[in-house]
Amino acid sequence: MTGPGAGRIVGHGIGLALLVAVVVQAELPESSTHQSVERYQRTTVGATPEEWARHLDDARAEVRLEAVKLLAESNDPKIDEYLMQGVDNSDPRVAAAAIDALGKRGAKDATSFLADRLAMAATSSGLRQRILVALGRIKDPKVGRAVLSFVQAESDQELRSLGIRVLGEIGDDSIRDEVRGLAARESSPDVKRLLDDAEAKIAARGAPAKGASPP
């Protein structure tokens, strides 16, 4: 058939084909979508933690960020080491994602590393905030003194206040007297209250369990 009628039929045919394609795609099972995502990840950054880690030095920041996200979801014991590499990435999004992942994982083997980065002058305020939050989630007493030193030296009141809260979460009993001393010398009622709360949390964490004999 030729002429305008044929054109309409062809047009309707193309439209129907497109509609069918959309419907078929929409009806694909979730497993197929998941498999497609997995295939994409394998072709871009690999399928193992070692392969993902190699992409932490990729020239493209988006690939580095994807590598960190994949690492964060893995249970491989080597992941913390790879995520620490991500913390030093030049792209702040990659560094932030790596810090958040270490905190979420409760990575105690990374706390000294994070405390060192907290004290570095080159670390931005935004990343310092994320490091403090991560340390508060991990709750490793061995970095309590490092966080206390940060609190004593920090001039940014928002960061200082966050650091004081983290001291309470960490619960390092060895710095309890120093926290109490800071509270006694503090002129700001709000900051003094934060220090008192932190000292109370440290005391509670260091107290023996009810019914237990003191050491």
Image (spheres, rainbow, N blue to C red):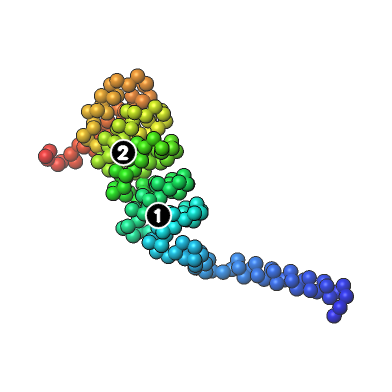
| Helix, strand or loop status at disc 1 | helix
**Quadrant in the picture for the C terminus:** top left
Residue visible at 40% across and 50% down? 86
| Amino acid marked by disc 1 | Ala
Q: Residue 109, percent across and down?
A: 28, 49
Residue at the spot x=23%, y=32% of the render? 175
* Distance in Å between CA atoms under marks 1 and 2: 23 Å
How far across and how far down the image is residue 78, in percent? 32, 57
Say what amino acid the circle numbered 2 marks. Answer: Glu
Does residue 172 appear to the left or right of 132 in the view shown? Answer: left
Q: Are marks 1 and 2 in contact (CB under 8 Å)?
A: no
Residue positioned 25% across, 24% down in the render: 181
Label 2 sits on residue: 169
Q: Residue furthest right?
A: 3
Q: Residue 1 at x, y = what percent?
A: 85, 80
- The local crowd at label 2, few if under 14, some if 14 to 19, many if 20 or more residues have their Cα within 10 Å, is many
Q: Is residue 27 visible?
A: yes
Q: Is residue 204 visible?
A: no
Q: Secondary structure at mark 2?
A: helix
Tag of residue 72: 1
Quadrant for residue 130, please give it.
top left
**Residue visible at 43% across and 36% down in the picture:** 125
Query: Quick check: 90 left or right of 207?
Result: right
All told, the count of numbered labels is: 2
**Image vertical order of residue 63 relative to residue 198, above or below:** below
Camera-nearest residue between 84 and 76: 84
Which callout, 1 or 2, points at the residue further toward the start of the chain?
1
Q: Is residue 164 above or below residue 117?
A: above
Q: Dot 1, how many residues are within 10 Å of its Cα: few (below 14), some (14-19), or many (20+)?
A: many
